[in-house]
Image: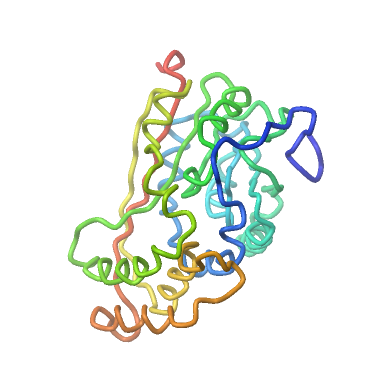
């Protein structure tokens, strides 16, 4: 495997069939670590148990972003590789892994799902967290089919906010983000893309199972402001220009829900695990 890239140009894919907005998160990357909710750590352990064999296996975290999943799986796997096309995200992931004392167990490399080096095989598990919708999904799954070992899996991770009293703040927060929809260059892509389940069911990874973990947290308003900045749509088509009024908008919207500068939230971490149907017990 190449020491500085997961792209093998001898096997490089032709131009992408869909627009994937590769520079969308150049400005937002700095806000991911402090803003986006981490996954409940129990979720990674549940997935590791269901997939099995990770102790001696290799995990690829594709679209690793700030490295949340790579760090969660580092103590559970024989090796972890985090891949992302955005240099700012990879820099954040390196810092986060070092802070978590997981740096020696994870290797972060630039790349995309469509151009992964065949030398990455065999992979026991490929994790994708809140990033699959930015990939050319059919092409990525076709590449992963060649890299994932027999009885290995692909797992899509995400977070949601259950309809519980602690999450009464969510509509107000979402309303602030929605004000930026019209300036979002990815608006049409996000509204017309086929859902992830349909993409997985149409691939060789057509057997799907789900697991979820709910976790109550106390979150400072400052982190919710950073969470708003972490969404690419608020940057419009200017990924290097900080949205000037967003922080004030978020604080005003969440003020009725805050106690001593923080809110309570219930975060649902969820994973959809996809296997090849013929390899299921």
Residue appearing at x 61%, y 39% in the figure: 60
Residue appearing at x 55%, y 42% in the figure: 76
Frontmost residue, 146 versus 27: 27
Residue appearing at x 51%, y 68% in the figure: 235
In the rendered structure, the answer to whether residue 167 lies left or right of residue 12 reads: left
In the rendered structure, the answer to whether residue 59 lies left or right of residue 187 reads: right
Frontmost residue, 216 versus 204: 204
Residue closest to the far top = 278
Can you give x and y, in whole percent of width and height, for residue 64 in the image?
58, 50
Q: Which image quadrant for residue 253? A: bottom left
Q: Is residue 26 above or below residue 211?
A: below
Can you give x and y, in whole percent of width and height, for residue 125 in the image?
55, 33
Q: Which image quadrant for residue 181? A: bottom left
Q: Is residue 271 above or below residue 244?
A: above
Frontmost residue, 54 versus 11: 11
Residue appearing at x 34%, y 65% in the figure: 178
Q: Quadrant of the N terminus?
A: top right
Q: Quadrant of the C terminus?
A: top left
Residue closest to the far left = 165
Q: Is residue 98 above or below residue 256?
A: above
Can you give x and y, in whole percent of width and height, for residue 150 in the image?
56, 19
In the rendered structure, the answer to whether residue 173 lies left or right of residue 3 reads: left
Can you give x and y, in whole percent of width and height, for residue 226 in the image?
47, 73
Q: How many numbered callouts?
A: 0
Frontmost residue, 182 versus 128: 182
Q: Is residue 249 above or below residue 21?
A: below
């Amino acid at each position: 495997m190449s020491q500085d890239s997961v792209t093998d140009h001898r096997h490089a894919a032709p131009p992408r069939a869909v627009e994937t907005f590769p520079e969308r998160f150049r400005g937002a990357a700095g806000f991911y670590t402090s803003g986006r909710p981490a996954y409940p750590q129990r979720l990674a352990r549940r997935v590791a148990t269901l997939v099995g064999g990770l102790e001696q296996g290799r995990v690829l975290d594709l679209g690793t972003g700030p490295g949340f999943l790579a760090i969660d799986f580092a103590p559970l796997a024989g090796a972890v590789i985090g891949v992302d096309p955005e240099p700012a995200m990879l820099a954040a992931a390196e810092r986060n892994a070092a802070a978590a004392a997981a740096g020696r167990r994870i290797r972060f490399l630039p790349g995309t799902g469509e151009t992964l080096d065949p030398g990455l095989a065999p992979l026991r598990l490929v994790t994708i967290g809140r990033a699959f919708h930015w990939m050319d999904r059919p092409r990525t799954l076709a590449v992963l089919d060649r890299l994932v070992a027999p009885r290995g899996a692909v797992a899509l991770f995400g977070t949601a906010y259950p309809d519980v009293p602690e999450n009464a703040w969510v509509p107000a927060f979402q309303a602030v983000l929605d004000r930026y929809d019209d300036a979002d260059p990815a608006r049409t892509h996000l509204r017309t893309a086929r859902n992830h389940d349909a993409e997985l069911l149409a691939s060789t990874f057509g057997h799907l199972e789900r697991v979820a973990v709910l976790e109550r947290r106390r979150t400072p308003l400052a982190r919710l402001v950073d969470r708003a900045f972490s969404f690419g749509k608020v940057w419009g088509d200017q990924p290097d220009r900080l949205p000037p009024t967003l922080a004030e908008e978020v604080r005003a919207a969440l003020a009725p829900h805050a106690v001593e500068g923080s809110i309570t939230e219930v975060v649902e971490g969820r994973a959809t695990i996809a296997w090849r149907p013929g390899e299921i017990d």
